[in-house]
Image (tube, rainbow, N blue to C red):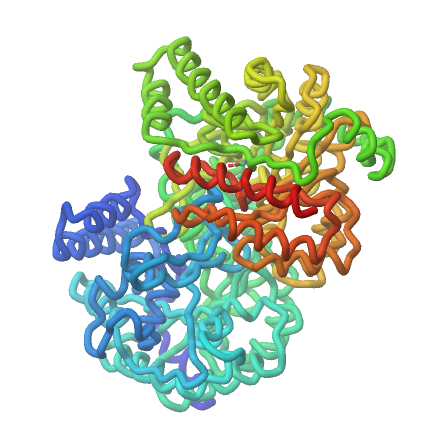
Amino acid sequence: MSTVSKSTSSKSSAKSTSSLPVATLGTPRIGPRRELKMALESYWSGAIDENALIDVGVGLRAANWARQKSLGITVMPSNDFSFYDQVLDTSVMVGAIPKVSGWKGGDVSFATYFAMARGSQGYAHDEACTHGSHAGGTSQGVPAQEMTKWFDTNYHFMVPELAQDQTFSLASRKPIKEYEEARSLGYQTRPVLVGPVTYLKLAKSADTSFDPVTLLDRLLPVYVEVLGELADRGAEWVQLDEPCLVLDLDAAARQALQRTYAAFAEAVPQLRIMLNTYFGELGDNLDLAVSLPVAGLHLDLVRGPEQFDEVAAKARKDLVLSLGVIDGRNIWRSDLSSLLDGLEPMVDLLGPDRVELAPSCSLLHVPIDLGLETDLDPDVRSWLAFSIQKMEELAALGAALAGSRANVAATLAASDAAAAARLASSKIHDLAVAKRVASVDATMRRRGSDFATRAGEQHRRFKLPAFPTTTIGSFPQTAEVRNARGAHVRGTLSDAAYKTFLQNQTARAVRWQENIGLDVLVHGEFERNDMVQYFGEQLSGFAFTKHGWVQSYGSRYVRPPVLFGDVSRPHPMTVEWWQYSQSLTERPMKAMLTGPVTILNWSFVRDDIPREVACRQIALAIRDEVADLEKAGAGIIQIDEAALREGLPLRKSEWKSYLDWAVESFRICSSGVRDDTQIHTHMCYSEFNDIIDAIGAMDADVISIETSRSKMELLDAFRTYKYPNEIGPGVYDIHSPRVPETRDMVDLLKLARQRLADSQLWINPDCGLKTRKWEEVRPALVNMVAAARELRNLA
Ligand code: GLN
Ligand code: ZN
C-alpha cells in the first residue's frame, strides 16, 4: 500500500532523541493504591457521584502519562484506561449494547455501562471461585454480560453478545476523548483499540448460533469512523490489538484480518497502525501478519523469541517492528546485558528507524510499583520488576541501543549483579529438592491398586449410603471471619484468641453438618485467606507482596503469590485443623488441599526453570502433606484442581504436553496413599469434552464438578468416555443467592442418573460456599440432603 511506505520517511523523532522509541502498549489502570477500586465501590454504594468518579479517572490517567513520560517512555498509549474492562468499552464504542439495558441511542450512561458489567441489581459476579472466571447473571433486572478469561491470563473480560442481525454505530467516543485529554496535557499518544477481528472472535452469538466474524462488514465502518476522527485530531499512530493472531485461526478469521487492514489502509491512509500481537508466537499466522498493510507489527519475543528472524526476513523493508522483550506477564527483573546481546544484531539488521522496544504485551497484567514492597525479603526484591521498573528497563535498553551501553553503565551493572545473585542464591536453589524431583519414579505416579479394588476397600471402610452427600470445602467467609482475620494480621487479636475464634467457627459448622445429616463433613476452611495463598505462605519458595495487585475483573484485584525458589514443606500445613475437626465428630471428615497445578497457575512463576519442574516440586510438597494426613487418620482427602483447565496453552498443539505434566503432578501428590484412602478432587468448570482423557488419567477416586447450570449435559463427556470412578456433579449453583428447591435438585439428579451409574454418584454443590451467606447455605444444604433421601427411596 502506498500509504504505508511513506511511514518511515516521515518518522522523524527517533533520531533526534537519545533513545530508540520505547512503548508500554498499555498500563495498569487500577492506581498504585487501588484508587480505582475505592472510587468504583464508593460510586456503586452511592457515597460519591458520577462527577467524582469521572475525576478519579482523569487523575489516574494524568498520573499514568506523567509517570511514563518521566520514566523515559516515548510512545505512550491512550484509551488503555477503563472503568471496568477494555472489551466492554469496545462493545459500548460500537453500540453493541443489549436492548434490555434500556439504551436508546445517544451517550451511554454509567448506569447502562455498569448494568452491562454487573447486572442492574448490583453484584452479579460473586467470585465464588476465588479468582473469578465465572459467568454472570442475576435473577432480576438486566443480566450482567458473561465474563471469561482474556486468553491465558487471569484477567476476565466481558463477553460481547452479538445477534445475527446486529447493527453497529458509534455510541461512545471514549478513544477520541482520551486522546484529546492527553493532548490537552501536552502528550502525543498512540491510542489503543481492541482490533475488530479479535473483538469478534471473542464475542458470542446472542441468538442463533453463527460465527460473529460474519458481522465484520457491519462493524468496520464504526472503526473507520473512530480512526478517521483520531487522525483528524492529530493522532499519527494507533495501536490495534489483535492477539487472535497467536491462536489457531480458521480461513474466515484470516480473511477477516486481511479485509480489515486493507479497509483501514484505504480509508485512513494518513494514520499509521501498529498491529499488536502478544501472548505467543505468530506461528502459522506469520505470513498473514507480515502481509497486512500496516506500518508496524508488535511481536511477543518473550513467548516467541524464535519468530524474529523469519518475520525480519519476510517483512516489507519499511515495516516497523516492535520488539516485545520485557516480560509483560511476569514480575522478574530482566537481565539487561543479555537482552542487549540479543537486541543489538536485530537493530543492526533492521536499522534504528524500524525498531521500537516494548514489553511483550500491555503491562496490565503486572503489579504497579515494586517500590511499595518495603517488607519483602531484600534479596527476593532485588530480583523483581513491576510495571514501573519494567519501564525503567525499557528506557535503559532504548538508551543503550541508541548510543552505547556506556550510557547506562550503572543500570547495567546493577542488572548484572542481580542476575548473578539470583543464579547463585541459596534461597532459590535447594539441592535436596532437586534430588527429590530427580528421584520421582513410576511407582510414585500410580496408586497401589486399580480403581475397582480401591473402591471396594473404601466402601467397606466408610459404609456410606448410596448417593453420599458432601460439600466442596468452604463455608461462608462472613464479615465476622474476615474481621477476625484482619485483626489478627494487624496484631490486635492475639494468636491464641484468633485460634479459639476459628475453633468455635469450625465446631459450629461441624455440629450443624451433623445435624442436617450430611455424610462426609468438611471443617469449613475458616482459617484460610485464600486457597492458594494459605499454602504458599507455609511452603518455602514463595513470597507475598503487600501492594502487588493485578486486575482480575472490574474492581476485583488479586495479589498472586511469587514463586521464586525451590519448593519444600518445612512442616505440616493442615493436619492440626483436620485433627481438631475430626475430633468433633464420628462421621468422616474430609481433609482439604489445593493441588499443585492450581497453586502454579494462580502464582507468578519463576522463569529460570520450566513450569513443569516447578509444578513437580509443589506436587512433592503436597504429597508429603497427604502422607501426614493419612498418618493422622484422614481417610478422605480432597485435592482441588480448580485451575487445571485454565492453564491450557492457547494453541491446541501444545495441549498434550501441558496435560501430561499437569496430570503427572496430580498423580505424584495423590498416589502415595493406601487403597482404602479415598482421594477426591474438585474442578470448577463446565467443559470437559476436550480434556476428558486427562481427567480419566488423574484417577481420583471421586471428582466433584460444576454442572448445575449445564443441566448435567456435561456428564455426557464422562459417559462417552466410560469414566469408571465416582463423580459428584454439582446440583446447585453457588454463584447465585437463590436457594434451590429439593425438587430442582432431584430433577437434576435424575438427569445425572440417565448418564451415570447410581453407584458412581455423589451429591454436592457446584463449588465452595465461601462467598454465600449462611442464610442461603442453610436451607440450600437442608434441601440437598432431602434430595439425596428422595433419590435413595427412588433407587
Ligand atoms: N475447597 C475450595 C472451597 O470450597 C475449593 C474452591 C475452588 O475450587 N475454587 O472453597
Ligand atoms: Zn470450584
Considering only vertical position in the picture, is 379 above or below 241? above
- The quadrant holding residue 727 is top right
- The quadrant holding residue 498 is top left
Considering only vertical position in the picture, is 467 above or below 535? below
- Left or right: residue 214 versus residue 771 is right
- Left or right: residue 215 versus residue 313 is left
> Residue, x 70% and y 46% (percent of image)?
795
Taking the view exactly as shown, the residue that stands out farthest to the front is 793
- Is residue 424 something that shows in the picture? no
- Left or right: residue 147 versus residue 83 is right
What percent of the width, then of the height, locates residue 446? 83, 36
Q: Nearer the viewer, residue 266 or 99?
A: 99
What percent of the width, then of the height, locates residue 678? 73, 31
What percent of the width, then of the height, locates residue 231? 28, 80
Considering only vertical position in the picture, is 94 above or below 479? below
- Is residue 196 something that shows in the picture? yes
> Residue, x 13% and y 53% (percent of image)?
49
Considering only vertical position in the picture, is 264 above or below 97? below
What percent of the width, then of the height, locates residue 42? 20, 46
> Residue, x 49% and y 41% (percent of image)?
783
> Residue, x 44% and y 50% (percent of image)?
365
Q: Nearer the viewer, residue 313 or 375?
A: 375
Q: Nearer the viewer, residue 710 or 618?
A: 710
Q: How many numbered circles does the render carry? A: 0
